[in-house]
Amino acid sequence: MPPAVRARVGARLRDAREPGPTAWHRRPVSWGLVVSTVAVALVVFFTRAPAPRSVGGLEVAQASADLLVREDSEGVVIQGGEATLLDASRGITVRNQGALVVRREPTGVRLVRGRAEFSVNHRPTDALPAVVLVSGGAIEVMGTRFTVEEKGREGTVTLHEGAIVFRQLGGEVVPVQVGQRLAWPVVKSDEPVLLVPVSPEPALPESRPPPALATPPTPKVVPSRAPSTLVRAPSVDEVLRELEVLRGRHEFEHAARYIEESMRQQPVATRERLSFELGSLLTYQLKDAQRACAHWSRHEEQFRRGRYAEAVQRARGTLSCEGRER
């Protein structure tokens, strides 16, 4: 082979064996893009991952879409909507019933102003009670459900299930039983201090069947004479206030019939609360296991995964409903 040809062939073979400069420059660029993309994805994930929602040291377990809540010097202020606040370390659950101001303190949860339902997990007999602080003293709880209304210098507590003790500011202790309501400040006297300060509301008028569609009623000339209570069903708050009055008078059977009638007039969205109150009456006040177990079964079918599921299971366990059903 001539020397010139041999030189050209050798040059071509060397060029084929050696990688071009372009390949070495592309490889680090592609790995850099991969690393950058992964880093950006991790930053976005950790910055957008939702943190547990809490306010004022209380966890927001549930909240309605229209909830308006803020935190200031008084504590947690709920201006609108509904929320379930949880003090997990003490096992205290607070559900507001309207505007509310509540504050977590070292010795317990203080209701500053408003109306709320409290639920406290059952505690061992050798454990210290959970404490709900109010203007007139402290409510000591070992596990129960009750409603507290605080107006600043006075208020009431109504016990729905379990047992509580009210400790006045002076240290005097007043036990409260199921169906009883205590008001503070407690009047100094020799009479029992358990009172029902709310005056009985007038009885609801009997509902009349609507006229047949074939004979519609003639419009009245003066519509203002028609009483408004005949055309408006009582609200849930009105029903609950009447229920507390009946409970305070120990008219439990009357209260059960009243709730059954009121549930038929309420929309589906508000029936769960009344259904739960009816089951509590049958379980803890009337102690009618047969009616209560049947009611709890219907309640669970209608309100699956409801807000009172844990309390319903406790009531069914108290009545041994599973054994009765078997």
Image (spheres, rainbow, N blue to C red):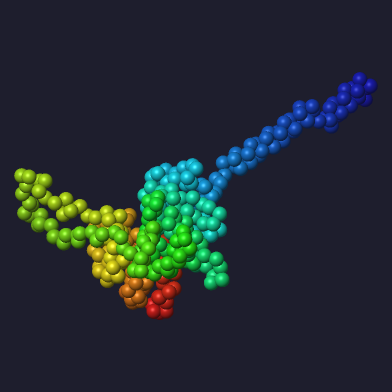
For the C terminus, give its image quadrant: bottom left
User: On the picture, is 43 further left or further right than 131?
Assistant: right
- The residue located at (56%, 68%) in the rendering is 127
Front-most of residues 274 and 284:
284
User: On the picture, is 250 further left or further right than 42?
Assistant: left
Q: Is residue 298 visible?
A: no
Q: How many marks?
A: 0
Which percent across, then down, holds residue 267? Answer: 28, 55
Residue at the far right: name it. Answer: 3
Q: Is residue 74 visible?
A: yes
Which image quadrant is residue 296 in?
A: bottom left
Which percent across, then down, holds residue 300? Answer: 38, 65
Which percent across, then down, holds residue 85? Answer: 47, 53
Residue at the far top: name it. Answer: 4
- The residue located at (25%, 69%) in the rendering is 254
Q: Is residue 95 above or below residue 316?
A: above
For the N terminus, give its image quadrant: top right
User: On the picture, is 90 further left or further right than 274?
Assistant: right
- The residue located at (18%, 53%) in the rendering is 229
Residue at the far front: name it. Answer: 189
Which percent across, then down, holds residue 157? Answer: 38, 60
Front-most of residues 74 and 294:
74
- The residue located at (6%, 54%) in the rendering is 215
Front-most of residues 11 and 302:
302
Which image quadrant is residue 256 in?
A: bottom left
